[in-house]
Image (tube, helix red, strand yellow):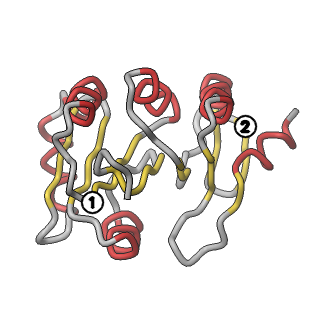
């Protein structure tokens, strides 16, 4: 477990859903799910919907990226087992620049959207997201691509290198 309480970082544009709520929480024995996303933090309806998916007995934090950075850097989650869920690698870069130790970042689902290219099944990125992944890698962060804990762990950089 990391010193800041974050035990798993996942990029998944679906945020909290079955794979995160059931498989990942059980696999890492999480005590809290944290979604750090500015749009979610400002949308009470979306926060209410996401809270319904959080498994019983787990705490949740649905907060902005800046609030997450401040809370993590202040040591608020030390001693907890937090799964940090981000909607985009751009948010991961913000977290890193804000002083948050990320270690390994696992990419789950990034949907097909206008202007995306396919990296791997279920992972589609814009040019900005691709650059964000490269920045994370350059900072020494291990990037993995794994939908559920039982899947083989793929190195996301192997897929990124194929695009170049």
Classify mark 1: helix, strand or loop.
loop
* Up-down relation of residue 148 to residue 65 (above or below): below
Return the residue at label 1.
81
Q: Is residue 147 left or right of residue 60?
A: right
Picture coordinates of residue 39, whole percent (x, y): 28, 29
Picture coordinates of residue 68, whole percent (x, y): 25, 33
**Rounded to the nearest whole Å, what is the CA distance between mark 2 and mark 1?**
34 Å
Picture coordinates of residue 157, whole percent (x, y): 74, 45
Residue at screen point 12% across, 36% down: 44
Q: Is residue 115 left or right of residue 19?
A: right
Residue at screen point 55% across, 64% down: 147
Classify mark 2: helix, strand or loop.
strand
Picture quarter containing residue 41?
Answer: top left
Between residues 157 and 19, which one lies in front from this camera angle? 157
What label sits on residue 144 in the rendered view? none
Residue at screen point 28% across, 55% down: 82
Q: Quadrant of the C terminus?
A: top right
Q: Is residue 120 left or right of residue 86?
A: right
Residue at screen point 55% across, 46% down: 111
Picture coordinates of residue 8, whole percent (x, y): 41, 55
Between residues 28 and 87, which one lies in front from this camera angle? 28
Q: Is residue 71 left or right of residue 89?
A: left
Picture quarter containing residue 51?
Answer: bottom left
**Label 2 packing within 10 angstroms: few (<14), some (14-19), many (20+):** some
Picture quarter containing residue 95?
Answer: top left
> Nearer the observer, disc 2 or disc 1?
1
Return the residue at label 2.
117
**Label 1 packing within 10 angstroms: few (<14), some (14-19), many (20+):** many
Q: Quadrant of the N terminus?
A: bottom left
């Amino acid at each position: 477990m990391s010193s800041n309480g974050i035990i798993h970082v996942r990029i998944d544009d679906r945020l909290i859903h079955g794979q995160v709520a059931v498989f990942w929480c059980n696999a890492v024995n999480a005590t809290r799910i944290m979604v750090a996303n500015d749009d979610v933090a400002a949308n009470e309806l979306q926060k209410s919907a996401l809270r319904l998916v959080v498994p019983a007995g787990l705490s949740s934090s649905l907060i902005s990226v800046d609030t997450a950075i401040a809370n993590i850097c202040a040591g608020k989650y030390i001693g907890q087992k937090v799964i940090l869920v981000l909607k985009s690698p751009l948010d991961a870069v913000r977290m890193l620049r804000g002083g948050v130790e990320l270690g390994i970042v696992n990419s789950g689902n990034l949907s097909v959207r206008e202007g995306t290219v396919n990296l791997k099944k279920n992972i589609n990125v814009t040019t900005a997201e691709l650059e964000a992944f490269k920045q994370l890698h350059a900072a020494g962060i291990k990037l993995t691509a794994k939908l559920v804990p039982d899947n083989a762990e793929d190195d996301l950089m192997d897929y990124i290198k194929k695009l170049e």
